[in-house]
Amino acid sequence: MSKKKILLGFIALVILGLALSQFPPIKRRLSWRIEVAKTYLRGIVYPAKPIPTAQPRPTSLASSTSQPAPTISIAETIQPTSTKTPKPIPAQVSLPVPSYELQDMNNCGPASLTMALRYYGWDGDQFDISEIIKPIPQDRNVNPEEMVYYVRNYAGWLRAEYRVNGSLPLLKKLIAAEYPVLLEETFHFDEPYYPNDDLWAAHYILLTGYDDAEEVFIGQDSFHGANQKLPYETLEEDWRPFNHVYLLIYLPEDEAELQVLLGDDWDEEKNRENAWQASLRATASNPEDAFVWFNLGSNLLYFEQYTESANAYDEARTLGLPQRMMRYQFGPFIASFQDHRTEDLLTLTEYALQRTPNSEEALLWHGWALLQQGDAAGAVADWELALKHRPNYFDAEYALDFVR
């Protein structure tokens, strides 16, 4: 065979390979391999370290570490009359299982939401959802607010709400009333993605049943598979780092029943007050638990108690948080910004960006910290990069409008 034929054959193979690499399933697999390699290399350049503890604060801004009650005004809780007679909660419930959706790269949120929507007859898939709320596959996080946004705007015949401070009895009560529940919980990697990886991340899962005899919930897990058995104790442990957040999708005509099931937690502000009280009790009974301090910070942040919130987050950081914690929750950024702790905000966001350089939330708040230091050009660069990683990111658009 002549050298010319060999060369032509090689060129043909390259062209064929390039063409196949654009085929969506192959393209996604290649993208994932590239992301894994980039993550490992970044772990070498920026070795994984603990989340930085709080920096010393100006005396004029320092405050007591005690957590005073938020000054709030709770609206009178609606007490609707349900059209259905409450039923005793059975010891075992199995709801109809929606068609299973195996998640694509970084897509547990859209995949889990897909299964929740299919329970009500929706016929889309995870890519219909991710195209709207995370159009860049490398985006590693979807917030509960974004999932609610999708349901309300793209599955408008359904309604959606999320609350915090859930409990195992409440989950069972909801499932027994035929409402599957979406949770954000801890995910444990089997293998490290970089040196000294603590193997901790976040994950969404849809609960569709439970069994008191086995003490397990049944979960539709977009990564591990359908009908996973989740022991009560394990679920509680994995749910706690996310303030016991839960998301409900329902038909409009069922809203009255859900209001009865949730009681005063149906009112969002009352739900947060209950969560604040629960997390305050948890810090008293488990003062060495970093997650309960983090939850306290998040609940105080809701009531704009910025100094007290920052103090609670400080305690959580001192006790030790997972390396990826601020890939998924951004309360420490907001509290530091509002409490004028600019150096601390820079330190936190730069740490977060070492682990997740495309985090639009970390870029947003890093930009605000730079602006507080007078670096408007640096802030604009951060916000433009945030929009590159998350097109139509409203908070970055607002920030750019603020300085222009």
Image (cartoon, rainbow, N blue to C red):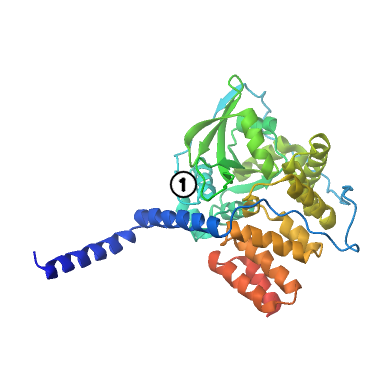
Q: Position of residue 148 (x, y in %)?
A: 61, 52
Q: Position of residue 145 (x, y in %)?
A: 64, 53
Which quarter of the image is occupied by the N terminus? bottom left
Q: Quadrant of residue 261?
A: top right
Which residue is at 62% across, 33% downward? 235
What amino acid type is highlighted by mark number 1? Gln
Which of 101/316 is in front? 316
Residue tagged by mark 1?
103
Q: Position of residue 397 (x, y in %)?
A: 63, 71
Mark 1 falls on what kind of element? loop
Residue lying at the far bottom of the rendered structure:
404
Which of 26/277 is in front? 26
Q: Is residue 211 above or below residue 17?
A: above
> Seen in the image, is 62 located left or right of residue 113?
right
Which residue is at 40% across, 55% downward? 28
Q: Position of residue 60 (x, y in %)?
A: 91, 64
Sort mark 1 into few (<14), some (14-19) or many (20+) by Cα contacts within 10 Å: many
> Seen in the image, is 315 located left or right of residue 102?
right
